Image: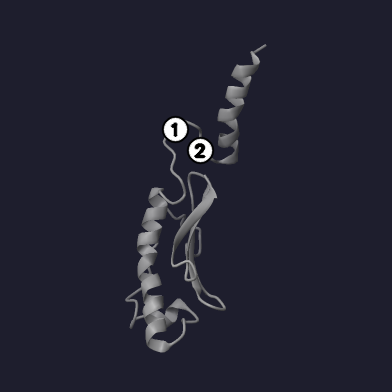
Amino acid sequence: MRPLPALLLAISFALPLLAGCCVPFTNCCKPDTCPQAQDGRARLQPVVEAVVAYRTAEGAYPDSVAALIPAYLPALPARPAWVSPERAAWWSYARTADGFTVEFTYYGPGSNWCRWASDAGAWRCGGHF
């Protein structure tokens, strides 16, 4: 039978693997520093800026991103290679009662999200990494 410390060590490495999370002492990234998060934020920052410009010019946030094209945004952001082709949409825009949000999700490691909320005025990322 294995000694208890060795068994606990084995469990501490196995649980994150089973949960789809990072394994301790490996090259993991936090949701805001992963390459997918950095790429997604860079692709969607023009959308955020276009929404803000629309509000400045029109006095209200748009109901949809379609209202931004072509005057405020030349085209929708291209689908990144890290997004599964089976996913219908890789990001979303929502007008809220007092602002807006732009959000996307990505996987690996774990299941993560990044969101721009107008009330915070910045990107925030989180999830299960």
Of helix, strand and loop, which one carries label 1? loop
Color theme of the render: one colour
Q: Amino acid at mark 2?
A: Cys
Residue 112: percent from the left, percent from the top? 51, 52
Q: Quadrant of residue 21?
A: top right
Residue 38: percent from the left, percent from the top?
Answer: 38, 54
Q: Which residue sits at x=47%, y=49%?
A: 31
On the question of residue 80 being in view, the answer is: no
* Numbered badge on residue 58: none
Q: Quadrant of residue 8?
A: top right
Circles 2, 1 touching at the beta carbon (< 8 Å):
yes
Left or right of 80? Residue 9 is right
Q: Is residue 68 above or below residue 33?
A: below
| Residue type at numbered disc 1 | Thr
Residue most extreme to the bottom = 58
Q: Which mark is residue 22?
A: 2
Circle 2 SS class: loop
**Looking at the image, which residue is at 40% across and 77% down?**
52
Q: Residue at x 50, y 38 (%)?
A: 22
Q: CA distance from mark 2 to mark 1?
A: 7 Å
Which residue is identified by label 1?
Answer: 26
Q: Few, some or many C-alpha atoms within 10 Å of disc 2 (few <14, some 14-19, many ≥20)? A: many
